[in-house]
Amino acid sequence: MTDSSYEDDKKHKRYNDMLFFVADSDNGIPLRCPCGGQIVIHVCKAGTNIGKKYFVYKHFENDGSHRKKEWDEAIEEETKKLTRKVDDHELKIRSLYSIEDHLSRLEEDGKKNAEEIEDLKYFLKNHYPNEFY
């Protein structure tokens, strides 16, 4: 006998997965059908859309439970999504360059400060030999 809360958890997980697949199939290349099934590329061989490509559920039925998405539309959306990612990465890289420049200036300042501290130690040691050592 299984725990009823375990069964409820499994149902909620399947439902959440389905929601993810619905949202996923609305943007770019779908990973899975909302039913959780495998997506394949189908080339239309009849009617007015001969040669047109679609991302469809492997066992597609036009019952509203499955997804059929035009290949051109999915590729265009995926390209836009990837372009945004590349732009974001470019901004991050540029900010890293400015951080790198700032770090090198801080390192130079640290070296100058270390030299200045050594000079001050030398001065104090020579002018006040009994007070600091």
Image (tube, helix red, strand yellow):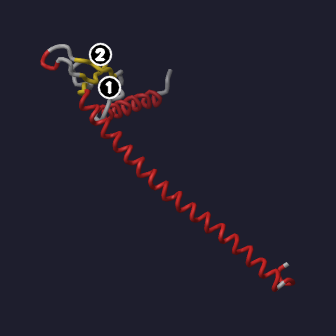
Q: Is residue 58 above or below residue 24?
A: above
For residue 46, side relative to residue 105 (left or right): left
Q: Amino acid at mark 1?
A: Cys
Q: Position of residue 92 (x, y in %)?
A: 44, 51
Q: Position of residue 51 (x, y in %)?
A: 20, 18
Residue at the spot of label 2:
59
Q: For label 2, count other residues whose C-alpha is less than 10 Å away and answer few (under 14), some (14-19) or many (20+).
A: few
Q: Position of residue 42 (x, y in %)?
A: 27, 18
Residue at 28%, 36% (x, y): give it.
77
Residue at 37%, 33% (x, y): give it.
16
Residue at 20%, 14% (x, y): give it.
45
State the residue in front, 39 or 79.
Answer: 79
Q: Is residue 43 above or below residue 133?
A: above
Residue at 82%, 85% (x, y): give it.
128
Residue at the spot of label 1:
33
State the residue in front, 39 or 121.
Answer: 121
Cα distance, mark 2 to mark 1? 10 Å
Residue 44, quarter of picture: top left
Q: Is residue 60 above or below residue 29?
A: above
SS for callout 1:
loop
Q: For label 1, count other residues whose C-alpha is less than 10 Å away and answer few (under 14), some (14-19) or many (20+).
A: many
Taking the view exactly as shown, the residue that stands out farthest to the left is 48
Q: Which mark sits nearer the N-terminus, 2 or 1?
A: 1
For residue 63, side relative to residue 119 (left or right): left
SS for callout 2:
loop
For residue 13, side relative to residue 115 (left or right): left
State the residue in front, 75 or 24.
Answer: 75
Number of marks:
2
Taking the view exactly as shown, the residue that stands out farthest to the bottom is 127
